[in-house]
Image: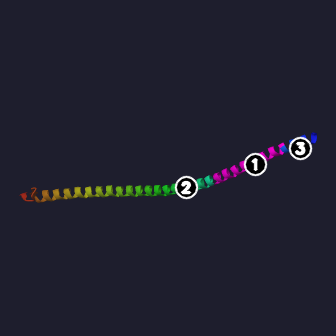
Amino acid sequence: AAGVAGFSAGVTGFAAGAADFSAGVAGFAAGVTGFATGVAGFAAGVTDFSAGVADFSAGVVGFAAGVGGFAAGVTDFSAGVAGFATGAAGLAAGVTDFCRFCSRSGRFFSRSGRVLQQE
């Protein structure tokens, strides 16, 4: 009777162990699935990171080009200012020469260009 009771307890323990083993197999399978999902997510993150690095690099190149364009614009503007100053000086010299011509020759001109007075 004690042997039968022990055998019965062993069968019950075995059944409990088999149930635990089945639960363990199911948990392992869930873990493998989760690991695969994690690997896929990591791969997607690496891809996104690489795309972000490429975008950042393109942005740096674009920014450098913009800075170069701005510097060229400043240079062109400075040349324009210098040209304007040269033109203004030339205009002033031309007016001065014209006034000298008028005062030396005694000729004074109207707006239409006619001689108003001549000595």
Q: Which of 105 and 43 is in front in this view?
A: 43
Real-space Cα separation, disc 2 to disc 3, in angstroms: 67 Å
Q: Which of 28 and 103 is in front in this view?
A: 28
- The answer to whether marks 2 and 1 mark residues whose Cβ atoms lie closer than 8 Å is no
Disc 3: which residue = 7
- Which residue is drawn at the image coordinates 23% and 57% (left, top)? 91
Q: Which amino acid does label 1 sit on?
A: Ser
Give the class, few, some or many, for how many residues have Cα within 10 Å of label 2's Cα (few <14, many ≥20).
few
Residues drawn in magenta: 12-39
Q: Nearer the viewer, mark 2 or mark 1?
A: 1
Q: Is the magenta stretch mostly helix, strand or loop?
A: helix
Real-space Cα separation, disc 3 to disc 1, in angstroms: 22 Å
Disc 1: which residue = 22
Q: Nearer the viewer, residue 95 or 118?
A: 95
- Which residue is drawn at the image coordinates 75% and 48% (left, top)? 22
Give the class, few, some or many, for how many residues have Cα within 10 Å of label 1's Cα (few <14, many ≥20).
few
Q: What residue type is labelled 2?
A: Val
Q: Which mark is residue 53?
A: 2
- Which residue is drawn at the image coordinates 53% and 57% (left, top)? 54
Q: Which mark is residue 37?
A: none
- Which residue is drawn at the image coordinates 45% and 58% (left, top)? 65
Real-space Cα separation, disc 2 to disc 1, in angstroms: 46 Å
- The answer to whether marks 3 and 1 mark residues whose Cβ atoms lie closer than 8 Å is no
